[in-house]
Image: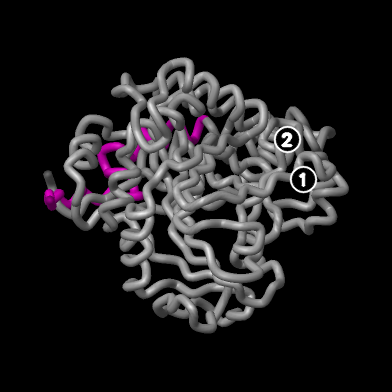
Amino acid sequence: MMVSLKKAKAISSEPKPERANLIGRPMAVVRKGVRALRRMLGPKPAVRERWCLWGEVLKGAWVHARSGETPRSAHAALIDLFIASGGRANDLLSKAVAIIHPPYRLPPAYGVLGKLDNGGLEKVQRQLETDGYYVFENCLSEDFCDRIIRQTLAFNCMITGDNLPGGVVRGRYERGETPKAAKYLVTEDDTTDIPEVQELISDPSIIAVAQNYLKSKPIFSGIGLWWSPAFSGMADIEAAQQFHWDMERIKWIRFFIYLTDVTAESGPHCFIRGTHKSGAIPDNLLRLGYVRHSDETILQTYGRDAFLEFVGRRGTIIAEDSRGFHKGMEPKKGDRLLLAFELANTTFGANKRHLIRNVHVPRFGEFATRYPRIYSNFDFALSV
């Protein structure tokens, strides 16, 4: 059944003329305050730099609140502030967001992750907070996964990899044929037009786990669907096959959904247990910046016991705080189709939106009306 949705009004990044003074005056106060702090902290460069980062983040937050867009300088400052504070700044900002946007009263958390009562949600929450991940097995049927697979094979993907330095190539993923690169990414708009994807982004259990972890209303802030074929046998940086931490938002949780069987040779997702916590990444790694790291560096730092390699049948779903170190292992044989959802407490950070061309799933249309903040990063082409 197809339900149409109405085109959302575009949000202008420029303040309206009648609001210019209302925005300009507080911004002037913020700028004066930052300059005063710089003078006051003159002989303490490290402290002065951190206050400047806070000022840039707060100025960017003001712009984001008015326009929905984050200045690049503010996102860069968020990353630098994470590095400078070891993640503690994000924790403080998250508490503020939770006060401003307290959780929804949601329906029972029954869905693809199981029938999660309060006890079940608490169990998941404890492991997420302690270890940074939770694995749900046998969540999706083979038929459900096959339907998504068939649709992806009909799309023109964005083909990316280290061997394509000139830019992105477009083309279909031909299973069984020699691949052109390490990653075939389905476009965001094609991904959200898949009915099965719409079923998942309106699944009560996924939304409940995310809200419980974020302690505030969640937002679907990023969706990705891509094929990872066996290509060169070497870790591909462009395809995120080296260890890294994410910092696109203030606080978020990701769901990595296996749509094909994943063995040790077909590109399992990997995670370093506990590295999502504030202070868990040592200064010598943080000082290197927002970069990729070799297996040797990570294993020397955390040891083999912290290294997790998630293998599983299709339908496996991994909930993870990807602020911790993670990567996709390069496939040695076969291929892997992965669907990833990011739910965050705010869209402050990376600017990326999703278009919903049509609503194919009635529950999705209903949830979009009932819980508008959850879907506030979507632009709907038509109204219900």
Position above or below: 349 against 173: above
Q: How many residues crowd around disc 1 within 10 Å: few (fewer than 14), some, or many (20 or more)? A: some
Q: Quadrant of the C terminus?
A: top left
- In the image, 276 versus 27, the foreground residue is 276
Say what amino acid the circle numbered 1 marks: Leu
Residue 351 in the image, given as x and y percentages of width and height: 44, 51
Asked if residue 85 lies left or right of residue 118, the reply is: right
- The region drawn magenta spans 1-29
Q: Is residue 62 above or below residue 177?
A: above
Res. 165 image quadrant:
bottom right
Q: Which residue in the protein does label 1 denote?
A: 286
Q: Residue at x 61, y 76 (%)?
A: 231
Residue 367 in sight: yes
Depth check: 96 or 176 in front? 176
Q: Is residue 266 above or below residue 248?
A: below
In the image, 32 versus 96, the foreground residue is 96
In the image, what residue type sits under mark 2? Gly
Of marks 1 and 2, which one's residue comes earlier in the chain?
A: 2
Q: Is residue 4 left or right of residue 142?
A: left
76 left or right of 177? right
Task: Give residue 113's position: percent from left, percent from top.
Answer: 42, 35
**Residue of label 2:** 86
Q: Residue at image x 56%, y 28%?
A: 93
Please check the rendered image and state whether residue 367 is part of the magenta-colored stretch, yes or no: no
Indicate the secondary structure of the residue bearing disc 1: helix
Question: What secondary structure is found at the residue carrying circle 2?
Answer: loop
* Residue at the extreme right of the image, as rendered: 300
